[in-house]
Image (cartoon, rainbow, N blue to C red):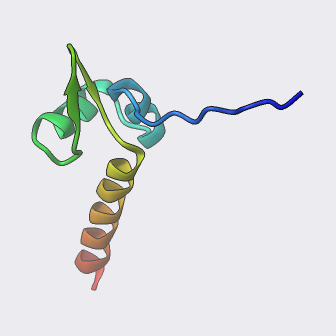
Amino acid sequence: MTTTVIERKWHSTTEVAEMLGFGLSKTKMLVLTGEIRSVKVGRNRRILPAWVDEYIQRVSAYAEGWAA
């Protein structure tokens, strides 16, 4: 018997907050300001894993530039 593991394609705002170690309010503000890209699906916001990675890379690059 073969078991198929389905990986999540989208994250909720709550899941992203947990991943980043941020509060839900801060994460929602980052989404609303466009700092973290998202799409609206029905009444919910969804975020691709790549968009979380983009945010992290942008913040890291800024921090590296600031330290220089």
In which quadrant will I find the N terminus?
top right
Query: In the rendering, at what x and y percent does residue 43 appear?
Result: 20, 13
Q: Nearer the viewer, residue 6 or 29?
A: 6
User: Which residue corresponds to the image point at 32% horizontal and 58% vertical from the top-left?
Assistant: 54
Q: Nearer the viewer, residue 68 or 7?
A: 7
User: Which residue corresponds to the image point at 36% horizontal and 48% vertical from the top-left?
Assistant: 52
User: In the image, is residue 65 above or below residue 50?
Assistant: below
Query: In the rendering, at what x and y percent does residue 37 appear?
Result: 22, 44
Q: Nearer the viewer, residue 65 or 41?
A: 41
**Number of marks:** 0
- Give the residue at the far top of this rendering: 43
User: Which residue corresponds to the image point at 45% horizontal and 37% vertical from the top-left?
Assistant: 9
- Give the residue at the far bottom of this rendering: 68
User: Which residue corresponds to the image point at 31% horizontal and 25% vertical from the top-left?
Assistant: 24
Figure quadrant of residue 47:
top left
In which quadrant will I find the C terminus?
bottom left
Query: In the rendering, at what x and y percent does residue 20 appear?
Result: 42, 42
| Left or right: 6 in relation to 18 | right
User: In the image, is residue 66 above or below residue 9?
Assistant: below
Query: In the rendering, at what x and y percent does residue 48 appear?
Result: 36, 42
Q: Which of 55 and 63 is in front in this view?
A: 55
| Left or right: 1 in relation to 41 | right
Figure quadrant of residue 4:
top right
